Image (tube, helix red, strand yellow):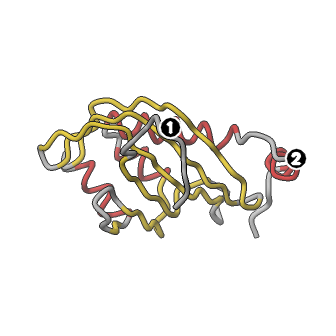
């Protein structure tokens, strides 16, 4: 069985920030910007379920191929806000709001988007994204008013 890092356990119990997850978010951002499929492969679980901005569900293989083929080309990725919440010592949820400029199938998409990712420490002890979603933030300056 996977053994939980004592620092992570303390962070969960005390409600402290998640430096490991913050660092992983920076790594995945860098990999997206550079099209580093090998880095993405290490950061994404084989069991990934990801809902894209268009509502379509994608797998790890589909996501990696989209980056490898150039279907996705990130031009800029500027984080504006990152929140991390611990679910338990081996699962965390991140919510990242960012200004993006991305070519999708040759069409430029620009705007403010929010990624929600579920990070899990897998059997080998490595943290990977197991689920995620991205959607456009239509009114970035407007506060949340409920569902």
Return the residue at label 2.
Answer: 14
Q: Secondary structure at mark 2?
A: helix
Residue 136's tag is: none
Q: What x and y, as percent, mark residue 28?
A: 46, 42
Contact, CB < 8 Å: mark 2 with mark 1?
Answer: no
In the image, residue 56 sits, relative to residue 33, either above or below, namely below
Q: Nearer the viewer, mark 2 or mark 1?
A: 2
Please give left or right for residue 116 compared with residue 109 in the image.
right
Q: Secondary structure at mark 1?
A: helix
Pick the residue in front: 78 or 127.
Answer: 78
Count every numbered label the image shows and give the total.
2
N-terminal-most mark, 2 or 1:
2
Q: What x and y, as percent, mark residue 57?
A: 34, 69
Residue situated furthest left in the rendering = 106
Say which quarter of the image contains residue 113.
top left
Q: What x and y, as percent, mark residue 63?
A: 32, 57
Other residues around mark 2 within 10 Å, as few (<14) / some (14–19) / many (≥20)? few
- Residue depicted at x 47% and y 32%: 79
Q: What x and y, as percent, mark residue 4?
A: 79, 57
Q: Quadrant of the N terminus?
A: bottom right
Return the residue at label 1.
Answer: 27
In the image, residue 80 sits, relative to residue 108, either above or below, namely above
Pick the residue in front: 141 or 82.
Answer: 141
- Residue depicted at x 87% and y 52%: 13
Other residues around mark 1 within 10 Å, as few (<14) / some (14–19) / many (≥20)? some
Q: What is the spatial separation of the Cα atoms under label 2 and label 1, in whole angstroms?
A: 25 Å
- Residue depicted at x 19% and y 47%: 104
Please give left or right for residue 121 compared with residue 57 in the image.
right
């Amino acid at each position: 069985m996977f053994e939980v890092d004592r620092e992570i356990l303390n962070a969960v119990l005390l409600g402290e920030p998640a430096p490991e997850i913050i660092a992983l978010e920076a790594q995945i951002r860098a990999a997206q910007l550079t099209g580093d499929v090998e880095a993405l492969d290490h950061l994404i679980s084989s069991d990934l379920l990801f809902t894209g901005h268009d509502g379509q569900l994608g797998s790890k293989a589909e996501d990696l191929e989209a980056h490898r083929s150039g279907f996705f080309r990130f031009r800029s990725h500027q984080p504006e806000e990152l929140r991390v919440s611990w679910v338990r010592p081996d699962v965390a949820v991140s919510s990242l709001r960012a200004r993006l400029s991305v070519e999708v199938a040759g069409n430029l998409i620009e705007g403010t988007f929010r990624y929600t990712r579920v990070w899990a420490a897998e059997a080998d002890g490595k943290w990977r994204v197991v689920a995620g979603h991205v959607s456009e933030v239509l009114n970035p300056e407007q506060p949340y008013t409920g569902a």
